[in-house]
Amino acid sequence: MLRFSVFLFFLIDPILLLGKWDLKFAEANFNMINSSAFQATPKEKQDEILEINELYLKNAVIEFRKDTVYWVDVNPREKVLVHKKGKWVVIGDTLKIFDYDKIFTYTYLVKINESNELEKRMVFPDGIIARSKDVYTRSESEN
């Protein structure tokens, strides 16, 4: 019975995800910029990485509607925003996003934290869960 109770704790009601979410914090980006590898990178390359990073951080958004999800990504080669669309489903604490453009499925471990923020951690194809998380807040237009 305890196992079942613990499992219920991790269920995410998909209705809680509906709406628009703005990126508040991208831990992987923060860790990269503060890494020794980044510090050892030539200044010109650092500036390029920071430009792409800033473009992403200022524009990353995810919007869940009925069964469709919209999000903004960055094409790092061209340094432009890419507007994406796909189908989404939540199973327990796992969010699956089916990217219509790439015919690819992204898998994330998700939770709504105590501050009512959406936390996402990538689940890689081999099942390993990323250490870094992205944190989103509900868009001001949603409040």
Image (spheres, helix red, strand yellow):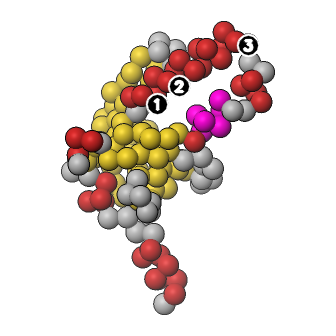
Q: Nearer the viewer, residue 22 or 75?
A: 22
Q: Is residue 95 visible?
A: no
Residue at point 31%, 54% (across, down): 17
Residue 67 position (above or below residue 30): below
Circle nearer the N terminus (1, 3): 3
Q: Is residue 35 left or right of residue 9?
A: right
Look at the magenta stretch and give its main secondary structure: helix
**Which kind of residue does numbered mark 1 sit on?**
Leu
Mark 1 falls on what kind of element? helix
The span shown in magenta is 28-33
Q: Amino acid at mark 2?
A: Asn
Q: Label 2, on which residue?
A: 53
Q: Are marks 2 and 1 in contact (CB under 8 Å)?
A: yes
Q: For label 2, count other residues whose C-alpha is less than 10 Å away and answer few (under 14), some (14-19) or many (20+).
A: some
SS for tag 2? helix
Give the distance between the C-alpha atoms of the residues marked 3 and 2, in whole angstroms.
16 Å
Alpha carbon separation for disc pair 1 and 3: 22 Å
Is residue 107 one of those drawn in magenta? no
Residue at 47%, 15% in the rendered image: 79
Q: Is residue 80 left or right of residue 33?
A: left
Mark closest to the chain's N terminus, 3 or 2: 3
Whole-percent x, y for residue 114 in the image: 43, 63
User: Mark 1 highlights which residue?
Assistant: 57
Residue position for label 3: 42
Give the x, y percent position of residue 66.
Answer: 21, 50
